[in-house]
Amino acid sequence: MGSECEIREWASTPCVMGIDEAGRGPVLGPMVYGCLYCPVSYMKTLSTLEFADSKTLKEEKREELFESLKGDEKIGWAVDVIDPRELSAKMLRKNKINLNEISHQSAMGLVKTVLDLGYLLTEVYVDTVGDPDKYRIKLTERFPSIKFVVAKKADSLYPVVSGASIVAKVTRDRALQNWEFDETAENMHRNFGSGYPGDPNTKSWLEDHKHSVFGFPSLVRFSWGTCEPYFKGGVQVLWEADEADDDDRKTAKRQSKLSNLGFTGMKRKSEDIESSGKGRCKFFQSRKLEQLSHF
């Protein structure tokens, strides 16, 4: 997480926080959660600082407001930049973590970060992800001493959330502008547009940067449905471990059928099976790899 980490003298007074995100929908780049916090007594002044939903502001105005809030002694901020590879890995793992849960975890992480810094958070306003009431209950159970207000379009209702929206949006825009590719292909370029699936420049960039074996560069959230059409005609990769898992499942089904019929067969000790090499993944068998109990 990145933040303005200097502890202000007002940290021990009641504080309010706003939380919002940028980059939830794009197929390219990170998703960024941002927060802005200040003394509760500064709320009236905050409403005069021209903060608004970042989507309604031009880039130049967002940059101006971000630099302004960074220099304000009564305002603190923090961000959580979630890499596109992390997003895809979590959404495609065996025990999947959906985008809503990733968002909730990020928001709660920001609250915890500011509390751990020593700020006395008493109110937190959040732009909702999913059902507002369920989200509010979830947050309250995690942080019972804080009053949470969770609402749709909170970034246009509460200046403290509008400020958080600007923090998140500017951080994401800068991350895209300064993105350093891990890949070194000669034909790579940065004309990827906004990163949203409907952007013609983004579509063209995805087409130009797909690879039949390795897929896409690390900038791409390859778990997004937008990417599926580009995989047609790609090289199919078969993993030996997957084939072994399939064989194990088939064997288990046969044994289950026999058991249901009353034929259980003779059970063998696991160490006997292991020493015979049967029941082990083909990958290990073919390479004559053995399990060691000590070194």
Image (cartoon, rainbow, N blue to C red):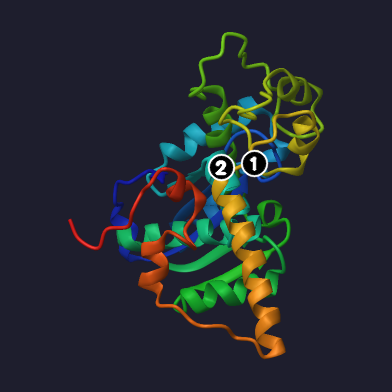
| Residue at horizontal 59 percent and vertical 27 percent from the top | 217
Name the image quarter holding residue 270.
bottom left
CB-based contact (under 8 Å), mark 1 and mark 2 = yes
Q: Is residue 29 in view?
A: yes
Instruction: Sort mark 1 into few (<14), some (14-19) or many (20+) by Cα contacts within 10 Å.
Output: many
For marks 1 and 2, give the one nearer the viewer. 1
Residue 150 place in picture, x, y as percent? 64, 66
Q: Which residue is more in the foreground, 215 or 78? A: 215
Residue at the farthest bottom position: 262
From this viewpoint, is residue 93 visible?
no
Left or right, 36 with reference to 149: left
Q: Amino acid at mark 2?
A: Ala
Question: Which residue is the extreme one toward the left?
Answer: 295
Q: State the residue in front, 6 or 218.
A: 218
266 to the left or right of 91: left
Residue position for label 2: 168
Badge number at residue 15: none
User: Mark 2 Cα within 10 Å, few/some/many (few <14, many 20+)?
Assistant: many
1 or 2: tag closer to the N-terminus: 1
Q: Which residue is mark 1?
A: 23
| Residue 99 x, y percent position in the rendering | 64, 55
